[in-house]
Image: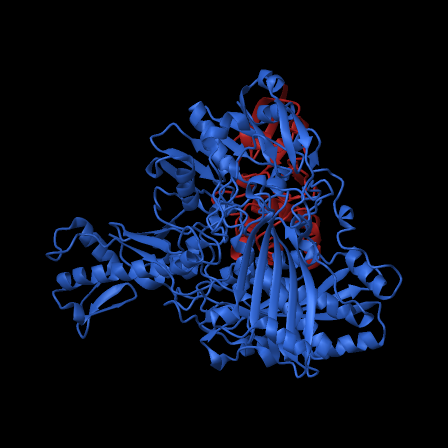
Chain colours: A blue, B red
Amino acid sequence: MTAATQPEAAEFGRARKRKEDARLITGRTRWTDNITLPGMLHLAMVRSPLAHAKITRIHTDAAKQLPGVIAVYTGTDLDAEQSSLPCVFPINVEATPPRHVSIASDTVRFAGEIVAVVVARSAAAAKDAADDIQVDYDPLEPVLDMEAALVDSTLVHPDHGSNKWAFFPLDSATAGTGGDADKAIAAAEADSDSIVVKRRFRQQRLIPAFMEPRSVVVDPTGEQLTMWSSTQVPHIVKTMTALSLGLPEHKVRVIAPDVGGGFGGKLQVIPEEFLSVLIARRMGKPVKWTETRSESMVSGHHGRDQIQDITIAAKKDGTVTALKGELTADMGAYLGLLTPACPAFGGFILPAIYKIPAYKFTCTEVFTNKTWTDAYRGAGRPEATFAIERIMNELAAELGRDPLELREQNWISHDEFPYTNAGGLTYDSGNYEAATVKAKELFDYDGLRAEQHRRRAASDSVQLGIGISTYTEVCGLAPSRLLGSLGAAAGGWEHASIRMLATGKVEVVTGASPHGQGHETALSQLIAHKLGVPFEDVEVLHGDTQSSPKGLDTYGSRSLVVGGIAVVNAADKVIEKARKVAAHLLECSERDLEFAQGKFTVKEANRSITIQEIAFAVFSAHNYPEGTEPSLDSDATFDPENFSFPHGTHLCAAEVDTETGRVTIRSYVCVDDVGTVVNPLIVEGQVHGGLAQGIAQALFEEAVHDEGGTLITGTLADYLVPSAVDLPQFTTDRTVTPATTNPLGVKGVGEAGTIASTPAVVNAVLDAVRHLGVVDIEMPCSPQRVWRAVQAARGAVKPVAEHATETAAGGGLGSIDAQGGAR
Amino acid sequence: MTRITVMVDGVSYVDDVEPRTLLVHYLRESLGKTGTVVGCDTSNCGACTVHLDGRSVKSCSVFAVQVDGSEIATIEGLARDGQLHPMQQAFHDNHALQCGFCTPGMIMQAIDLLGDDPDPDADSVRAGLEGNLCRCTGYQNIVRAVLDAAQKMKPAVSARQPSTIAGGGS
């Protein structure tokens, strides 16, 4: 038996170094692509180079003759059994989502879609053969512009009858959360004491670009079919594979081993998972598919891609009177797991931290012949936050007000919580003042404003801009009943179980599925905190549906806020079971026992027993209370009643070289309020990474297609994931306003940095050049775009029609070619 | 097939390889050195970085036949006698990794960087790691880790001599 040692310090809030690191820094990793099984065959996909075409013939004979090739499958071979990839949140509940095929059999709808699969004895042989497959296409007009698509001159899915998939409205007048926004805006337009500001923002298409390319291994030789997949959602993949392909769920096991990042990009059920299952089953042998980076870029789902028409009305004293957001969102060619839900989700949070008396939101969702879009870090919330934080700056500019002061005039003050926003979300807690005061101080807001004035007055060629983002977001996905009322196919609970081992060690099973977040460390801390056992005595099990049979996985900043609460609730049950045993062994009443630091102590007596000792007593089971079972093991399923709402203030100082268009972030300060914190080291790391991705949207990244629908930013040479030299040193800090909707007071931190930072940076860039007459610069604010905007404002060049510069954005490596598709 | 003799993490191997086989595939598939990973196909990401005769290379950009007679060091050979290399320790101490996929390449490149410049400032570290992409950390803690390792690898501070696995060729 292990004698319980007391934790050295309080575990909750401790900057523990991560347990996960040991294997990751030594190369003892278990990426899916590392897996090799006896007799394993390798798959290579042949992908369409065309965005929209009829397949007229696929020439597979030559490929089949190559050494090492076992088989070649086309859509015709597999169509009868491939079913449809799932969309679990269609938003449009009146129509059936168009069939989402894993492999096209007659029509291709985006460049990168799979048209044939090679099975070979080695990955190299499979690729060689894939290159030898010729496909004849009859090209169709590609539908590429989401607004033009609404004319329906060419249909992406003729069976659906329109390129419009869904129309999602939110109206505070009908919801009872405010007035009629259209009326309020019309009244403001007619009122000389009011102002109406309208802007159009473009959320460029992004690529999640997780570092580990996706990989799938399927072994059909056991009693259960086992799939290893580089996924965020092994439980969803398991259930959906069973439902869609007609496999009995208890005969399917899905394992997410070490997963190298996801950011929403691996929140998907992918064609390659289904095809691997179908082909492994036919072969009776294990198969593996690992994508190339170019395949990943063109066929992994993309994110964002919206046009936002935003209207805000205010009194001339700055009081906002109405907000209207009209979105057009590009679904791409198919509906993925959550494709239609992502832009719609933003509607609830567009009013953000402000008191908006009248609010209206619409989202028109459109099919095009591009890679389908779906969740990417923030999924709807970054877009909404960008829109509101940009329009608040525009309103400030129109009114000649300091943008921070204008925000303060309109935000919800700390004594007004709980507060139901105009979108119908009830914010439980927050303190926007406190975060802002701290951020201003760290940033030297007043000093930088003074410098900005000096440099403007001196007409410096390098101008200084200050950008602000006072955001809030929605975390902890999600209350199941609410999801049900919105038409989602599943709920948002999370499951945990705790196994008290004989020697007092603890196994914690979570349904959350980490891919870099540090759950093993954070959940170990939670257990050490709750049960008073040493941190080192806790093992966190996850990501294998055999050891973790129930779960809804990791996304939407839910792992701690939902999954962590399930762990805490399970721990409470363990303690209550142990209390009965403790009372029995110590021969006292349960009421006389205190539990602290892992030990039950009889009040006012010098007798105690540790929970780890009780675990052994229960294991031996020689002496335990009548009428109880000899086990401390417990599980819990937690379904949140509300979301959680992190918030914060981000301030960015950007220098803009007006001669070259180059943007340099001089300082970046953020003060985030993510509630109570289990591990500040992990929280800070999440904020850093989030900032990097949000800044990347503002300055660097864009998925660009040419006029034929070919992705021309299809490699990491063309799609500008920032390197260490592209990013500044961040100053991060926190305020702590605990959430009131969960027992830990936690709010979630996975997405905050990304959601907040994009508008802070763009607001800074515009603030640097607004006095020159620049009113907008589309993202990414590349040197060329910034330079052109400055030149246009000076009258030196004509403004460029949007998207006319797109072909300049790509590089020259050519991620896709006319013969074989993506390499 | 071409016969090569190569020392990898202190072990000598003799193998017949196809001329087109990349070093990274030889390491992963022939030797089972799966600690070194493939992150892209354009040599932008640096996840596959190893040391070839003491200098960092992207092993996706080297053919296996080119390393005949050479010594390769990978992430799996860094720890000695159960002791982490100071750079590995610094990555752990400074929370310089999240998903960990870029980490092997990042650590190998960082060691090489210190071989060239044993006492870099933050900007030099950033410049030295430009060829290695990380999507999780925003690089801040990676920079911190490399600066931390630089301090700890100074001979006066640590008796450990990292020169056998630090790059620089000097």
Residue A67, horizontal then vertical, whole percent: 58, 17
Name the residue: 42% across, 59% down. A485
Residue B139, horizontal then vertical, whole percent: 62, 55
Question: Does A702 appear above or below B58?
Answer: below
Residue B128, horizontal then vertical, whole percent: 69, 50
Q: Quadrant of the C terminus of chain A?
A: top right
Q: Which is nearer the eye, B164 or A64?
A: A64
Name the residue: 76% across, 75% down. A452
Q: Indicate left or right for A175 with A354 as reference.
A: left
In the picture as drawn, the residue positioned furthest to the left comes out as: A626
How many numbered dots are placed on residues in this image? 0
The answer to whether any part of residue B39 appears in the image is no
The answer to whether any part of residue A463 appears in the image is yes
Q: Indicate left or right for A390 with A544 as reference.
A: right
In the picture as drawn, the residue positioned furthest to the top comes out as: A65
Residue A761, horizontal then vertical, whole percent: 68, 64
Q: Which is nearer the eye, B129 or A248?
A: A248
Name the residue: 51% across, 76% down. A431
Q: Quarter of the image holding residue A200?
A: bottom right
Q: Quarter of the image holding residue A610?
A: bottom left
Q: Which is nearer the eye, A278 or A200?
A: A200
Q: Indicate left or right for A581 with A496 as reference.
A: left
